[in-house]
Amino acid sequence: MWKRLLNFLQRLFLRKKSVRLGFYGSTNVGKTTLANRISMDLIGEGVGTVSPIPHETRAVMRKEHVELKASGYSLVMDLLDMPGIAVKVDYRDFMEFGLSKADAQARAKEATRGIVEAIKWLENVDAALVVVDSTEDPYNQVNITLLGNLEAKNIPLLIVANKIDLPGSDAKRVREAFPQYPVVEVSAATGENMEKLYDELAVHLL
């Protein structure tokens, strides 16, 4: 994997010396897990905390100035893990995970602010990874709206069909839903197919 990663970094360096890469998608699709995986591969440090509770990431989590030097190359990346995008945020959803009403309402307010922040950050990213859960139907309002906004702003994007390690995963369904975009299937949790993701980043995004 490291040879492929170095090749990716070398090709990327020829185009940009600094890249702001945004991780976008619905809640609980594995954005933070993927950001952590890439950051661990690059510098051995994670980006954020993972939780089964929706909207664990409620503000943009940044791992800035991630630098790797190898074979005469130096590349700086800013990894931007965005809050999950949702059509609506209902505090009662959080109460199902054992949160009190007050805590759930506070979390809902923070999540709503996080969604607004994530959308605003579209003005400041150089490229985006749109993460989708390959065990679920990818053709939903969040993904359609998000992809439309990225395309309208001419932001290079790559769809990441995540969670291929889980039963019911169907990356083909993701490709069929969005045939106009490049798609790569991975398991951010296990690291499966990350080599392909680095290759696709170099080809399609940067």
Image (cartoon, grey):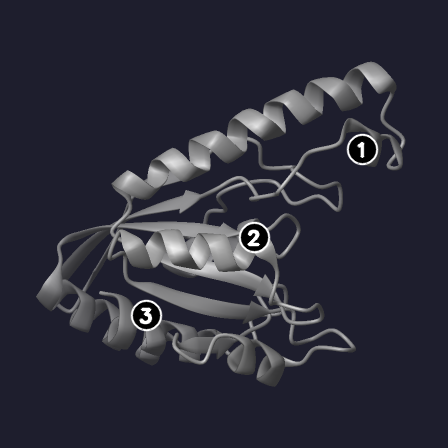
Q: CA distance from mark 2 to mark 1?
A: 20 Å
Which residue type carries mark 1? Phe
Along the horizontal axis of the image, is 139 left or right of 128?
right
Q: CA distance from mark 2 to mark 3?
A: 23 Å
Q: Please provide percent x and percent y for residue 34.
A: 52, 58
- Asked whether residue 187 appears in the rendered view, the answer is yes
* Residue nearer the viewer, 139 or 2: 139
Q: CA distance from mark 1 to mark 3?
A: 35 Å
* Residue nearer the viewer, 10 or 119: 119
Residue lying at 75% horizontally and 32% vertically, measured from the top left:
90
The quadrant of the picture occupied by the C terminus is bottom left
- Kindly identify which residue carries mark 3: 201
Q: Which of labels 2 and 3 is toward the front? A: 2
Along the horizontal axis of the image, is 55 left or right of 155?
right
Which residue type carries mark 2? Val
The quadrant of the picture occupied by the N terminus is bottom left
Q: Please provide percent x and percent y for residue 193.
A: 51, 79
Residue lying at 42% horizontally and 59% vertically, measured from the top left:
147
Mark 1 vs 3, N-terminal side: 1
| Numbered tag placed on residue 142 in the rendering | 2
Q: Please provide percent x and percent y for residue 14.
A: 9, 67
| Mark 1 Cα shell of 10 Å, populated few (<14), some (14-19), many (≥20) | many
Mark 2 vs 1, N-terminal side: 1
SS under mark 3: helix
Mark 2 vs 3, N-terminal side: 2
Instruction: Count up the numbered dots.
Output: 3
Among all residues in the image, which is located at the extreme top?
Answer: 102
Residue lying at 28% horizontally and 73% vertically, measured from the top left:
204
- Kindly identify which residue carries mark 1: 94
